[in-house]
Amino acid sequence: MGFSGGGSNLLKAHKHTSAVQDGGKLDMDNVTQAELTAGDVIFSDGNALQRLAIGAATNSLVVNGAATAPEWAAGGGAPVVTTQSITPTSSQTTVSGTFVDVTNASLTLPTRAGGFAFISAFASVLASGANTNIAIGIYHGGSLQEVQVNRLTDASNEYPISVTAMQALDGSVVKMQWKVSSGTATMVDVANFYSSRLQTFECS
């Protein structure tokens, strides 16, 4: 590209645009050269261009603490994903009007900084009488938190109830609990169908 102008040999100040005598557009497609090494990143410090040498294969490009420039940091690596699942004891019953633990429905979360678990509890239930409310809940983080109630209009059919929650991977216990408004509630699990289940999907 030519930089002469007006018969002078001096290189005129320019910005590399398509305007006349402005140096022309920079050809970045394997033509323009600079004192760089493979993989270098170029950024501005507000006054001039700066070079950031390529980082390690496991690094991630992040913004520095002052939010003024990019820098390399240790990469997080691939996410760690685990699951847990347990089937409550089939045909168990409760007559409790307050929440109690479901038998064989307890899991312990792993401890992984920054990780979370998606928790799912679902159950098939029967009531001993019509128009009975049966509720299930998820105990996590040290207390009963999410609750779902289903009104069973008859005593002849199984009814589904489900509830979900999120919990940090802090090594705490997750449990399914339940209660009934009157009479007896029965939990049903059909072999190989897992119609009642407590499970977690854990990611960090």
Image (tube, helix red, strand yellow):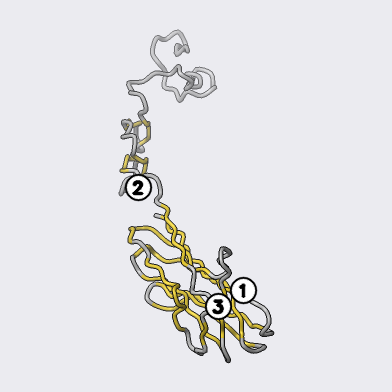
Left or right: residue 93 versus residue 157 is left
- Residue linked to disc 3: 187
What residue appears at the point 61 percent right and 85 percent down from the top-left corner?
127
Mark nearer the N terminus (3 vs 1):
1
Mark nearer the N terminus (2 vs 3):
2
Residue type at numbered disc 1: Pro
Disc 2 from disc 3: Cα separation: 55 Å
Q: Which mark is residue 67?
A: 2
Percent x, y for residue 62?
Answer: 36, 44
Q: Quadrant of residue 123?
A: bottom right
Label 3 CA crowd tier, 10 Å (few <14, some 14–19, many 20+):
many
Disc 3 from disc 1: Cα separation: 10 Å
Q: Of 160 and 139, which appears nearest the observer?
A: 160
Percent x, y for residue 141?
Answer: 38, 72
The secondary element bearing badge 3 is classed as strand
- Residue linked to disc 1: 160
Mark nearer the viewer, 3 or 1: 3
Percent x, y for residue 21?
Answer: 50, 17
Mark nearer the viewer, 1 or 2: 1
The secondary element bearing badge 1 is classed as strand
The secondary element bearing badge 2 is classed as loop
Vertical placement of residue 94 versus 20, above or below = below
